[in-house]
Amino acid sequence: MAGRPAVPHVIWARPERTGRGPRPAFSRADIAAAAVRLADEGGLDAVSMRHVAAELGCGTMSLYNYVPRKEDLYELMVDAVGGEHELWEPSGDWRADLRRVAHQTRELMRRHPWLPRLMSPVYGFSPNALRFLEHCLACMDPLDAPYGTKLQLLALLNGCVTTYVANELATAERTRALPWSEEQENQVRIAYLGGQIASGAYPRMAAAFTEDAGPIDLEAVFAWMLDRVLDSFAP
Amino acid sequence: MAGRPAVPHVIWARPERTGRGPRPAFSRADIAAAAVRLADEGGLDAVSMRHVAAELGCGTMSLYNYVPRKEDLYELMVDAVGGEHELWEPSGDWRADLRRVAHQTRELMRRHPWLPRLMSPVYGFSPNALRFLEHCLACMDPLDAPYGTKLQLLALLNGCVTTYVANELATAERTRALPWSEEQENQVRIAYLGGQIASGAYPRMAAAFTEDAGPIDLEAVFAWMLDRVLDSFAP
DNA sequence: GCGCACTACGTACGCTGTACGTAACTAGGA
DNA sequence: TCCTAGTTACGTACAGCGTACGTAGTGCGC
């Protein structure tokens, strides 16, 4: 019945400096920047405690003075790139403002393809996340609705953007780690898929794939999805 | 310029049995079932090649005869639980049918909390995924739109459901791995959050949290989200 | 100025995915 | 019918991971 020995830990509640002992050689911002740099260059797999420590130029275990668990390192990363969000004075047109927010989020995720994987409501209350949420709520001031509803719309909107960009990036992200090219693998997948479709067991899928559609315009699809979600909230 | 030595590999294109050599001791279904069992009981972290092999009662490296890469094991798992989808004769009311699909997907993910993490368009063409997609398209037969648009709506719908359930489950999933209880950690987070909010820097967030809202009805929120997405497609 | 809390970091443990080598087995072609 | 090539089975080994622990050294608060 005992169990659960340790004490809960949230990195944002822990002060960066306590006063006692030698001055820390790095700030949280330094550490987050190093981790983000590694992730941008080599994907999320390149972010290990050892690599980040090496990037900072310190011993592996020293890092644990700043970041007690690896998950906290992830929180730092998400918060750090969250700071890249440009915040502006709301225009009064909440739809336009939210569209702008969504496009910015998408750009952010394209700059940092590892971000969707780390996105989680658990990281929702870091300092920069709070600033971002406050800004989104400010954009929605013209809207007459309880904050609960507004937060729901924001969650839906962010969820859709995250999912969409994650799908957009999934294949590209895979390419980095695999020993063959994306086109090669796609070819194999399509070949298999073609066999299945030709079997006649999936007539609609077959029709969907033989349907002559022009090249997909990812920008247009994203904008369409966005408008649908916003429409849905206030038609 | 050489590089990229290996050959692309898609597990569904590889036959289960080639005829030569001793008969395999397990089927793909056996392996997938074992992995799913482990993941259901101990979370996704409990799914390692060693554990799955032990669960099957064979040596670790023997597993590699069936599953060349761990990612393939994941594909087997996603496909296996995809087979739990109940498919029915479309009713003619595409909205009702898609709602039913979404609720079923949610139930599926609540039965297998690790599923959202593995969901990815990459696994979109496994046998059971094809059956599922075909069924969804059949449900949308009454709808007059090109298949491309229908697939986009399905992607949006599935993406939203996945994100929503992932958020729903994220905290619960964390609890399993952490040495303290969810309530304890939430308390620490709320305490920190309270401090930030009391600082006055985030007036709208403060209002949102002091707003007297009844207890959140997760079912209702999910239904609301669903209707918004479906509305958005055909108001 | 004493002591304590902090920083720094080397070592070590258990775990992971998986490359490789070896032995046993069986179906297809001669 | 026998041979052999391709397959299964699996032990060993390696590089990498997160991180518990122990030991120094450092500098602020009392």
Image (cartoon, coloured by chain):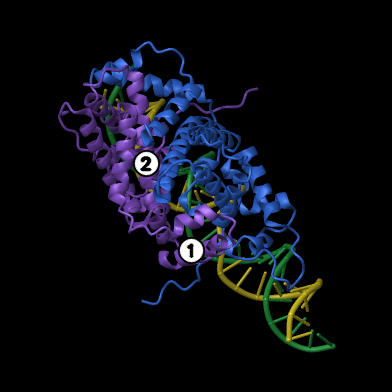
Chain colours: A blue, B purple, C green, D yellow
x then y, percent, for residue A164: 45, 33
For residue B126, say whether it is visible. Answer: no
Q: Secondary structure at mark 1?
A: helix
What label sits on residue B190 in the rendered view? Answer: 1
**Label 1 environment density (alpha carbons within 10 Å; few <14, some 14–19, many ≥20):** few
Q: Quadrant of the C terminus of chain B?
A: top left
Who's the residue at 38% across and 54% down the image?
Answer: B43
Q: Quadrant of the N terminus of chain B?
A: top right
- The answer to which of B36 and A211 lies nearer the viewer is A211
The answer to whether A122 appears left or right of C28 in the picture is right
Task: Tell me, yes or no, if residue B199 can be seen here.
Answer: yes
In the rendered view, does B233 fall on the left or right side of D13? left
Q: Position of residue A144 (x, y in %)?
A: 42, 43
Q: Measured from the top left, where is residue A203 in percent x and y?
A: 25, 18
Q: Residue at left 61%, top 35%?
A: A111
Q: Nearer the viewer, mark 1 or mark 2?
A: 1
Q: Residue furthest top?
A: A212
Q: Is residue D4 found left or right of A180 in the rendered image?
A: left
Q: Secondary structure at mark 2?
A: helix
- Disc 1 chain ID: B
Give the labeled residue for mark 2.
Answer: B162
Do the residues bearing badges 1 and 2 touch, measured as CB atoms within 8 Å?
no
- Left or right: A193 as drawn, with respect to A134: left
Q: Residue at x 38, y 19 (%)?
A: A191
Q: Amino acid at mark 2?
A: Thr
Q: Nearer the viewer, residue B175 or B213?
A: B213
Q: Position of residue B36 (x, y in %)?
A: 32, 48
